[in-house]
Image: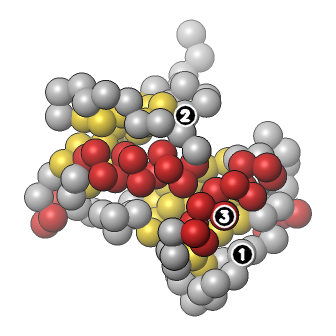
Amino acid sequence: MSVELNHTIVHSLDNRESAEFLAGILGLEAGPEWGPFVPLSLANGVTLDFATVPAESIVTQHYAFLISEAEFDAAFERIRSAGLTYYADPHRKHPGEINRNDGGRGLYFMDPAGHGMEIITVPYGGFPA
């Protein structure tokens, strides 16, 4: 059997809010609550399980999503329509810009719990998916 990432837990201040926030940006639907989790399933079979935890328990993480050019256009429009600040870089030094790293497009934005979210159209290294 090959090894695959199946799921990971994403700490949040409000599991439903965070799951629906990301689902809305990516054009997905958050699943029904399952125990303490609200799942968000991705196309490659990985599930992000959002869990509500106390604010002091949240250690901010980075999550990057490889999406198509058409999905990028749609997500970018949703980010702009929501009035979210986005950046061309992970250090947030270039607000209101996208990057063109590795021949694709990418940007960074923050989720409600303070996690750094990234959308890219070409994986690092410039090799198409």
Q: Which mark is residue 42?
A: 2
| C-alpha span from label 1 to label 2 | 23 Å
Give the labeled residue for mark 1. 98
Residue 124, given in percent of the width and then of the height, sits at 74, 57
Q: Residue at x 40, y 63 (%)?
A: 111
Residue 128, given in percent of the width and then of the height, sits at 85, 45
Q: Residue at x 51, y 69 (%)?
A: 82
Q: Nearer the viewer, residue 11 or 74?
A: 74
Q: How many marks?
A: 3
Give the labeled residue for mark 3. 77
The quadrant of the picture occupied by the N terminus is top right
Q: Amino acid at mark 1?
A: Ile
If you read the primary sequence from the N terminus, does the residue marked by circle 1 or circle 3 appear first?
3
| C-alpha span from label 2 to label 3 | 20 Å
Q: Is residue 52 above or below residue 77?
A: above
Quarter of the image holding residue 49?
A: top left
Q: Nearer the viewer, residue 124 or 42?
A: 42
Q: Are marks 1 and 2 in contact (CB under 8 Å)?
A: no
Q: Residue furthest top?
A: 1
